[in-house]
Every structure is written in structure tokens, then in C-alpha cells.
Amino acid sequence: MTQEVDRRVLLEQIRSDYRQILLSYFTTDKALQEKIDKFVNGVFCANIPVPEIIEIHMELIDEFSHQLRLEGRGDETLIDYRLTLIDILAHLCETYRGAVFK
């Protein structure tokens, strides 16, 4: 039971971190790369599967889309946030590749 609770807490933290990355991805946040590196290292160390990261991304984009529609705005710009997912997965792949060759 404790393991399941720990995993749920970890996934909520990962979700929160990813949300912050999404919100600042197209800004001039100088700490963005550091946030991405920290996120990727956390995901790698926790052995979170890639499909789970994709699921988190899709859930957050759905939430953003819903909020935009409530505000009467279009959600066409959310398609650009695929770049965030691609960037995260590329960093994660590089981390896996580096781990294999060490």
C-alpha cells in the first residue's frame, strides 16, 4: 500500500513539473532547460514508462483545451505544444542512450 501511495505522489509531482514546463515552454524562461533536465532525470530515475509521460501530456493538453473553450477562445495553439513532448522524449531517449553506453 505504501508503495502505491508513493508512486501516486511521485506521479503527481511529475505531472506538476511537466505542467510547469508546458506553461513556460514558449516563454523566455531562462531556467526552462534546467527544469527539463530535472524532469527527465526524475522520470529516468523513477523508471516511468514513456507511454505514461505521453498520457500526462495528453491529459494536461485536454485540461488546457477545456479551459480555453470555457474562456471562449480557440485551442488551435495547443497543437504547438507537441514540440514540448517531442523535446522531453528526445531528452529522455538521450538519457537512456547515455545509460546504455556507460
Image (cartoon, grey):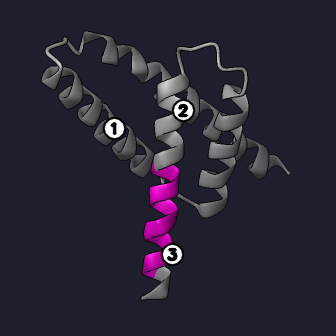
Residue 98 part of the magenta-drawn span: no
Mark 3 or 2, nearer chain start:
3
Residue 79: quarter of image: top left
Residue pointed to by mark 3: 6
The magenta-colored residue range is 4-15
Pick the quarter of the image with the N terminus.
bottom left
Determine whether the residue tagged by mark 3 lies in a helix, strand or loop: helix
Mark 2 or 1 closer to N-term? 2
CA gap between label 2 and label 1 equals 11 Å
How many numbered marks are there?
Answer: 3
> Which residue is label 2 attached to?
21
Q: Tags 2 and 1 in contact by the CB under 8 Å rule?
A: no
What secondary structure prevails in the magenta region?
helix
Label 3 vs label 2: CA separation? 23 Å
Locate residue 96 relative to residue 62 in the image: left or right: right
Inspect this view and state whether residue 71 appears. yes
Res 50 seen here? no
In the picture as drawn, the residue positioned furthest to the right comes out as: 102
Residue at which label 1 appears: 60
Q: Amino acid at mark 2?
A: Ile
